[in-house]
Amino acid sequence: MIEIYFKSLEGTWFVVALHKHRIVASSFGENKETTMKSVLGNLPFNVPFQVFLEPSAFAAKAFAALKLIHEGRDAGALNLPLATSHLPAYTEKVLSATLAIPVGYVTSYGSIAKAVGGGPRAVGNIMAGNPFAPIVPCHRVVKSDFTLGGYGGGLSVKLALLRRERRGFSALRDIQVEGGVLRVFPVEYVLRNFV
DNA sequence: TGCAAACCATAAC
DNA sequence: GTTATGGTTTGCA
């Protein structure tokens, strides 16, 4: 049985779907219904689910982590357990590479494609369907010219997240990921286009 | 800048 | 099986 929890924190709705102490899907947004729908749309079709009004201990932990990430703080050390085994292998690889982008950096669809194989558009498609927003930081994936690209929650939301993650880094970095090397760039490269 | 063509895994038929 | 679909990229005018 998948358990669904929702909670409003400082004006933002957070929704998580949990199964056996793993996160199956997560989302956030201004609108409760939309956010809930985005989570429900990412559930594996063959597992029944139930919506709970009071958060379990694990759900409370998940909400705390989501709030941190939403605030632009670093939740990397939390290592939230994600349920990915039902996803296609390539999707898993792309999500895992995306998860490796540190706070304060961005990368491009094409860079991810170079690191794990495949093409930029395939990566974009997977970002569009990211079941784990914002835990898997698809907001840190932008176009190769450092314009924003797209975002499910709207570009203003993507921009706001990136602004909060600004850390003042100035040099690019190469990060080891499963299957190759992922090049990441300071988020400033994106933000300077917006003054 | 702007446009066309190449790109590539998925989901939907 | 096949086709349609993008949160793209690159090259060329």
Image (cartoon, coloured by chain):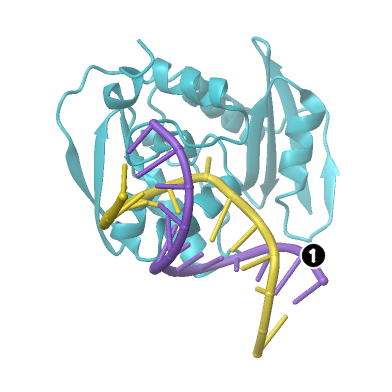
Chain colours: A cyan, B purple, C yellow
Percent x, y of residue A193: 34, 19
Instruction: Give the class, few, some or many, for how many residues have Cα within 10 Å of label 1's Cα (few <14, many ≥20).
Output: few
Which chain is home to disc 1? A
Q: Is residue A152 left or right of residue B3?
A: right
In the rendered image, which residue does mark 1 sit on? A46
Q: Is residue A72 left or right of residue A58?
A: left
Q: Is residue A51 above or below residue A44?
A: above
Percent x, y of residue A176: 23, 53
Q: Which of the 4 quarters of the picture holds residue A11?
A: top right
Q: Is residue A193 above or below residue A136?
A: above
Q: Is residue A36 left or right of residue A161?
A: right
Q: Is residue A130 visible?
A: no
What residue is at 41 percent from the left and 16 percent from the top?
A: A164
The residue nearer to you, when weighing A188 against A17, is A188
Q: Is residue A86 above or below residue A111?
A: below
What residue is at 26 percent from the left and 40 percent from the top?
A: A184
Type of the residue with mark 1: Asn
What residue is at 48 percent from the left and 41 percent from the top?
A: A136
The residue nearer to you, when weighing A182 against B3, is B3
